[in-house]
Image (cartoon, rainbow, N blue to C red):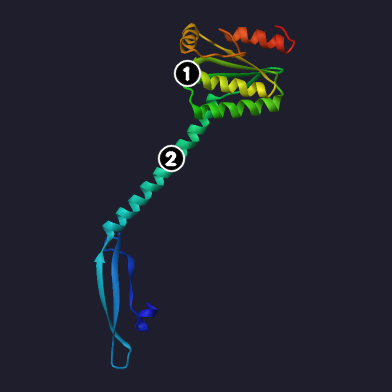
Amino acid sequence: MGNLRRGEYLAGEFCRIGKLGQEVWIQGSYNPVLDLTGKPSKIVKFATDITAQVEQHHQLKRAMEEAEEAARVREELHKSLQEMSTPVTPIWDGILLLPLVGIIDSMRTADVMNKSLTKIAETRARVFVLDIAGVATVDTGVANQLIKITKATQFMGCEAIISGVSPAIARTMVELGVSVGDIRTTATLRDAFEIALKRVGSTL
């Protein structure tokens, strides 16, 4: 209030305590009235109760903070689910297994490829088994994505085997005219594992 005593104008939003002890927000202005000597003789106050607007602003701010927190949690959950759905696992010395489950798209393919190639480099694996028994559907796009993954592993000097090829998937691949080239495919994971063991010079 020192400025008012010097005759200076003051305006803004102020928090006051009401008769019942509650917060009351006002939009107020304090206008000093000067006497003939230029000193403040009294102060004229104009005030408007803006408690409802302030509370609404605070509620909006809290809602935005909660929305941002929910988005952050959702993003962390999404990342965790991606990690869980792309488990590149060493199952034998020199053999890696990646069981795919769910839907395959270009974004997930890039994630699968990055994790697979990184794991191959870390473990110096010689065989990479990609099991698709849990993949929901296979079309031309999905087939090409799977072939991209296995081709990339071959560039790392690691042989790729696609296992879990069901009769329905095999028929779809033929009808779509998808060529797997020199990539080895098997109907079951066991068959792929037996082939992988031979490649690394081991037997069950």
Image depth: mark 1 or mark 2 in front: 1
Q: What SS does tag 1 mark?
A: helix
Amino acid type shown at disc 1: Thr
Is residue 87 visible from the viewing direction of this image? yes
Is residue 81 visible from the viewing direction of this image? no
The one nearer the camera, 132 or 68, is: 132
Mark 1 near mark 2, Cβ–Cβ under 8 Å?
Answer: no
Residue 34 falls left or right of residue 201: left
Q: Quadrant of residue 124?
A: top right
Up the image or down, 155 lies above or below 190; here it is below
The residue under label 1 is 140
Q: Residue at x 60, y 29 (%)?
A: 114
Residue 104 falls left or right of residue 91: left
Q: Position of residue 135 (x, y in %)?
A: 49, 17
Q: Residue at x 31, y 55 (%)?
A: 55
Up the image or down, 43 lies above or below 159; here it is below
Residue 202 falls left or right of residue 135: right
Q: Quadrant of residue 47?
A: bottom left
The one nearer the camera, 92 or 175, is: 175
The residue under label 2 is 71
Up the image or down, 22 lies above or below 165; here it is below
